[in-house]
Amino acid sequence: MIDPINVTDYNRTENELQEFIAFGLLVTGKNAITTSRLLDNFIKDFKYEDDALFEVFKRFELTVLSQALKNYGFGCYNAKAKGIYQLVRANLNLRTCTVDDLEKISGIGKKTSRFFVLHTRQDAQCIPLDVHILHYLRDLGHDVPKATPCNKKYLEIEKICLKYVSSSKKTCAEWDLDTWRTYSGNKVAI
């Protein structure tokens, strides 16, 4: 089960990597704690003992997967089913794939790709721009949007964050989680 409060783990098994990227895709527009619980219930109901999660998802046709996600309470289930369907058939190496590789999957944008890479690779130099990070930057006087921006603006804001990370003496993952915890009210220490 994904712990949405402590998501950084650089030693995940292949199946744990699969669960984490699925979580990243499914959490879009939904609370992380709720998504973790829903995904855990889905896995308990459909996963055989030694199955990799992607093999579980591959057993579903797209329309059936969409209906299953709807039945479990995942919002935007059609779009998320399309993303899961593409993801499990993309044959990505989840230990080495790039953010660009991940962003070729429907439903995985800059924030989700960076979230996955940041919290699975110790040397990652990227930031998933969520509402909490953007709020933090606005509090520091930066002119940034309230919602995650796209493309060029995303990269500009990410560079600002990386400067703050550098001066903080923390890893990108530590800085990201500290900011998230402060601005989300989840005050659990790393």
Image (cartoon, rainbow, N blue to C red):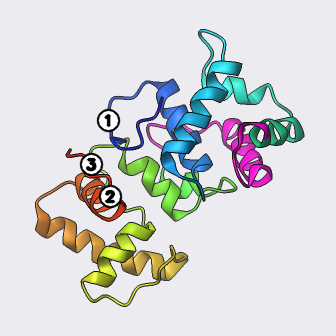
The magenta region covers: 71-97
**Most extreme residue toward the top, as rendered?**
49
Q: Amino acid at mark 1?
A: Tyr
Quick one: SS at disc 1?
loop
Residue at the (70%, 56%) spot, across then down? 106
Q: Amino acid at mark 2?
A: Gly
Location of residue 87 with respect to 171 vertically, above or below:
above
Q: Is residue 174 left or right of residue 38?
A: left
Q: Which residue is mark 2?
A: 185
Percent across and percent down for residue 43 are 63, 24
Q: Where in the figure is residue 65, as x and y percent of width and height?
A: 80, 37
Contact? badges 1 and 2 (CB < 8 Å): no
Q: CA distance from mark 1 to mark 3?
A: 10 Å
Tag of residue 123: 3
Whichever of labels 3 and 2 marks the residue nearer the N terminus, that label is 3
**Residue lying furthest front in this view?**
185
Name the residue rendered at 63%, 15% in the picture. 51
Identity of the residue drawn at 79% across and 35% down: 68
Numbered tag placed on residue 10 in the rendering? 1
Characterize the local packing of mark 3: few (<14), some (14-19) or many (20 or more) Cα atoms within 10 angstroms.
Answer: few
